[in-house]
Image: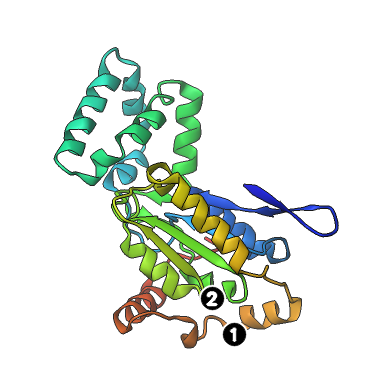
Amino acid sequence: MDTVPKQDGHRLAIPLVSGRFCWCMILVAYQFPHLVQRMVLVSTGGVTREVNPALRFASLPVAEELLGLLQLPGLLPAIRAVGNVLERVGNDLGHETPDLMRVLAALPEAGARSAFLRTLRAVVDWRGQVVTMLDRSYLTQGMPVQLIWGERGPVIPVTHARLAQAAMPGSRLEVFAGAGHFPHRNDLPRFLSVVEDFIADTEPGSYDPGQWRTLLRAGPPDAAVTGSPATRQAVRELLATDDRGATS
């Protein structure tokens, strides 16, 4: 979360969130549209069900007991060694080894493990992601949105970036070549430049209660979906067949 000064002396918050926590920001924008004027979403979840199988497994009841094994001496260094090998052979998951180890290092502690699993299970189950933003993405029209993705993201693939951009009218997309789930860790100067340019180039979105009510009642118009014909068709199929919802 960053802030920029306003003319009235107050500061305006710029929410900048990544991964599964993007869903929290999207929900805030949906429920409290008068409080959100811009969004920066990094490798956001909530597009399709697809997610890394490891997270699906972690949502199962047995995961808590298995994660408790991280307390065993030597297990974390062994996982790091495997991750380093995967990175050397070009595996996308291995590319995330430093961040994976940062997460795993906290999980031997029972409270941290419980908090991680509660957060994960709110948005992921054995089938994949259980929430979606697609059926409410059209509501971002008039609100500047910047999407940032890593080309090699193993958690939420970059194909989701194109779908999200197509479903969010007027949104901008920046894909970092060679980056994973945390593009800001690969190239922080470029990441900051993208965010700063986005703020400088856009005007804050405005909230009109009457227009918001009309949009909610009408539902997503077909014209709100943009992109290539194949991308538009993929988004329409997801909207027509997906049983998930923004209010699930």
Above or below residue 6? Residue 66 is above
Count of number-bearing discs? 2
Above or below residue 153? Residue 110 is above
**Lower sequence index among marks 1 and 2:** 2
Residue at screen point 26% across, 42% down: 93
Above or below residue 7? Residue 93 is above
Of 230 and 219, which appears nearest the observer?
230
Give the mark toward the camera: 1 or 2: 2
Residue at screen point 44% across, 37% down: 117
Residue type at mark 1: give it: Ala
Give the image location of residue 228, x and y in percent.
33, 81
Residue matched to label 1: 218
Give the image location of residue 210, x and y in percent.
74, 81
Residue type at mark 2: give it: Tyr
Give the image location of residue 68, x and y in percent.
36, 23
Toward the top, the furthest residue is: 73
Q: Is residue 86 left or right of residue 237?
A: left
In terms of secondary structure, where does tag 2 sit?
A: helix
Residue at screen point 67% across, 83% down: 214
Of 196 and 245, which appears nearest the observer?
196
Q: Is residue 122 left or right of residue 82?
A: right
Of 35 and 131, which appears nearest the observer?
35
Crowd tier of the residue under label 1, counting other residues whose Cα lies within 10 Å: few below 14, some 14–19, many 20 or above:
few
Q: Which mark is residue 138?
A: 2
Q: CA distance from mark 1 to mark 2?
A: 11 Å
- Location of residue 238 (image quadrant): bottom left
Toward the left, the furthest residue is: 89
Above or below residue 13? Residue 67 is above
Q: Is residue 217 left or right of residue 128?
A: right
Q: Is residue 231 left or right of residue 1?
A: left
Crowd tier of the residue under label 2, counting other residues whose Cα lies within 10 Å: few below 14, some 14–19, many 20 or above:
many
